[in-house]
Image (spheres, grey):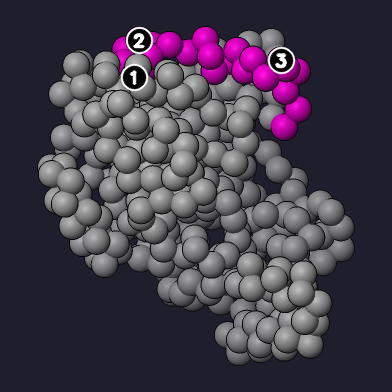
Amino acid sequence: MNRILLIRTSAIGDVVFASPLAHALRRSQPRAHIAWLVEAGIEGLIDSDPAIDEVIVWPKRDWSRLWRERRLGELGRAVRALRAALHARRFDTALDLQGLLKSGALALLSGAPQRIGLGSREGSRLLMTRSIPRGGAIERISSEYLHFAQSLGLDTSDFVPRLTIGETAAAQARALLDAHALPEGRFAVFAPFTTRPQKHWFEDAWQELAAQVRAAFALTPVLLGGPADREAGARMAAGTRMIDLTGRTSLAQAAAVVRHAALVVGVDTGLTHIGIATQRPTIALFGSTRPYLDTCRPDARVIWLGLECSPCRRTPTCNGAFTCLRNITSGRVVSEARLALAAA
């Protein structure tokens, strides 16, 4: 494998979880050319990674828009343009870390003669030359990618999520923090937002936690999220002393803000996992999902109550009570945060 294409186009957390694979490849094949194909908007997480030679952006939203508008001629030209760009790089191997039909199609589009999929499904197995079943100890962060790397015979020492923040994003984040009088290490990032309501902790719980974090650690709570979370962020911050930066950063800038934080508290969302990958003391609140229990870091801790109905993932049975998260108290979070900060 001399010219390698990694395909994990989304989502943010999964890209973070897969990040150690690039380093395992680099340790095992130091002279290889390693590229990563990712959806537009996520590239800022990995484009400064020293293990990656090139980040190739897949304009999925543009393709989807052309499909919806039935502009099939333009869509066909866009597909052919990406195919030509990938073929020009003469990849020997495509590693499909997503295992979906769309990612398998991208692997085929790359022209790589060797295509290896992880847990290939939705028919993508037919597009692979080899498929490796998912495996690994599910309690461990990045476990399925560790299993994949081990199956490929790679050097998997120090296989933990890691992110390198680019200089531009770091400078922009620093300017934003300065504008809000937030010195490095004197604030706590709250990451409350996801696309699924059953993964959310409750707004009143975040407000209560904000007051307790100020009192216990003298840290200013800072809300981070995407543009779609602005209304919820404003509502949550109202009447509190939280700094609301929801929707005011790019993903790379948000990661840079996280790196400057003294503490990160979040639900099962990309920014929480970024806290671990940027080596910040982190408390992860899991309920309907439980992507890991072992963070591989003494200063990153998981709170998961282990109710009989949890994890339910996309099919909650509690009629919206979400007891698996409601029963996590702000006091418990503060106790875990004290332990994480002491271990940092």
Amino acid marked by disc 3 = Cys
From the viewer's perspective, tell me whether residue 221 is left or right of residue 41. left
For label 3, the crowd category at 10 Å Cα-Cα, with few meaning under 14, some 14 to 19 and many 20 or more, is few
For label 1, the crowd category at 10 Å Cα-Cα, with few meaning under 14, some 14 to 19 and many 20 or more, is many
- Mark 3–mark 2 Cα distance, whole angstroms, equals 24 Å
Q: Give the mark, 1 or 3, whose residue is nearer the N terminus.
A: 1
Amino acid marked by disc 1 = Leu
What span is colored magenta in the figure?
314-335
Residue carrying label 3: 318
Which corner quadrant of the image does residue 129 belong to? bottom right
At a point 61% along the width and 86% down the height, the residue shown is: 85
- Mark 1–mark 2 Cα distance, whole angstroms, equals 8 Å
Which corner quadrant of the image does residue 305 belong to? top right
From the viewer's perspective, tell me whether residue 172 is left or right of residue 16. left
Amino acid marked by disc 2 = Gly
Q: Which mark is residue 331?
A: 2
Residue 60 image point, x, y percent: 64, 68
Q: Is residue 138 above or below residue 52?
A: above
Q: Give the mark, 3 or 2, whose residue is nearer the N terminus.
A: 3
Q: Secondary structure at mark 2?
A: helix
At a point 60% along the width and 12% down the height, the residue shown is: 323
The answer to whether residue 300 is magenta is: no
Q: Secondary structure at mark 3?
A: loop
Tell me, yes or no, if residue 58 can be seen here.
yes
Q: Which mark is residue 209?
A: 1
Say whether marks 1 and 2 touch (CB < 8 Å): no
Q: Is residue 267 above or below residue 182?
A: above
- Mark 1–mark 3 Cα distance, whole angstroms, equals 24 Å
